[in-house]
Image: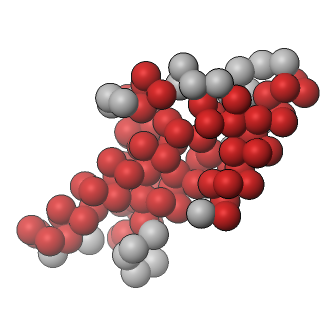
C-alpha cells in the first residue's frame, strides 16, 4: 500500500517535471505491480519466477482494463495498469496453486 501511494505521488510529480506521459525512467509502478503479484504467497523461487513472468506478460499484453486505464492522467495513469497486471498475475498464481498445487 505504501509503495502504491508513494509511487502514485512520485510518478505524478515526475511526469509533470519531465513533461512526458509515463516516462520509462519511472519504475515504481513495476515494483508495485510485481509486489502485488506475489504478495499473499510464500516468497519461494518458483513463486517469484512465476510472478515475474506472469506480471511481465500481462504488463506487455495489457488485457482489459489495463490498456484502457492508461488514459488516466498523472500518477494514477502511471500506476494503475501495472497494478492490474499484478492482480491478473496474482489470480493466475492463486488458481494454479489451488487447482494444481503449482508453484
Residue at image coords 70%, 29%: 74
Query: Does residue 41 appear in this view?
Result: yes
Residue at image coords 36%, 70%: 46
- Please, which colouring scheme is shown? secondary structure
Corner quadrant of residue 75: top right
How many numbered circles are shown?
0
Coordinates of residue 95 in the picture (x, y in percent) = 18, 62
Coordinates of residue 42 in the picture (x, y in percent) = 40, 81
**Residue 62 in the image: above or below residue 92:** above
In the displayed structure, does residue 26 sit left or right of residue 53? right
**Residue 13 in the image: above or below residue 45:** above
Residue at image coords 43%, 25%: 67
Query: Does residue 45 appear in this view?
Result: no
Residue at image coords 76%, 45%: 9
- Closest to the observer, 60 or 83: 83
Coordinates of residue 86 in the picture (x, y in percent) = 43, 50
Quarter of the image that includes the N terminus:
bottom right
In the displayed structure, does residue 68 sit left or right of residue 12? left
Q: Residue furthest right?
A: 17
- Closest to the observer, 103 or 88: 88
Quarter of the image that includes the C terminus:
bottom left
Coordinates of residue 83 in the picture (x, y in percent) = 49, 47
**Residue 8 in the image: above or below residue 41:** above
Corner quadrant of residue 52: bottom left
Corner quadrant of residue 57: top left
- Closest to the observer, 54 or 32: 32
In the displayed structure, does residue 43 sit left or right of residue 73? left
Amino acid at each position: 500500500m505504501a509503495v502504491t501511494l508513494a509511487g502514485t505521488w512520485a510518478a505524478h510529480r515526475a511526469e509533470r517535471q519531465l513533461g512526458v506521459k509515463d516516462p520509462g525512467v519511472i519504475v515504481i509502478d513495476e515494483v508495485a505491480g510485481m509486489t502485488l503479484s506475489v504478495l499473499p504467497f510464500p516468497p519461494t523461487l518458483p513463486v517469484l519466477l512465476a510472478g515475474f513472468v506472469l506480471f511481465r506478460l500481462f504488463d506487455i499484453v495489457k488485457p482489459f482494463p489495463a490498456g484502457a486505464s492508461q488514459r488516466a492522467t498523472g500518477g494514477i495513469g502511471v500506476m494503475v495498469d501495472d497494478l492490474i497486471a499484478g492482480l491478473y498475475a496474482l489470480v493466475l498464481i492463486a488458481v494454479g496453486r489451488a487447482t494444481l498445487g503449482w508453484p
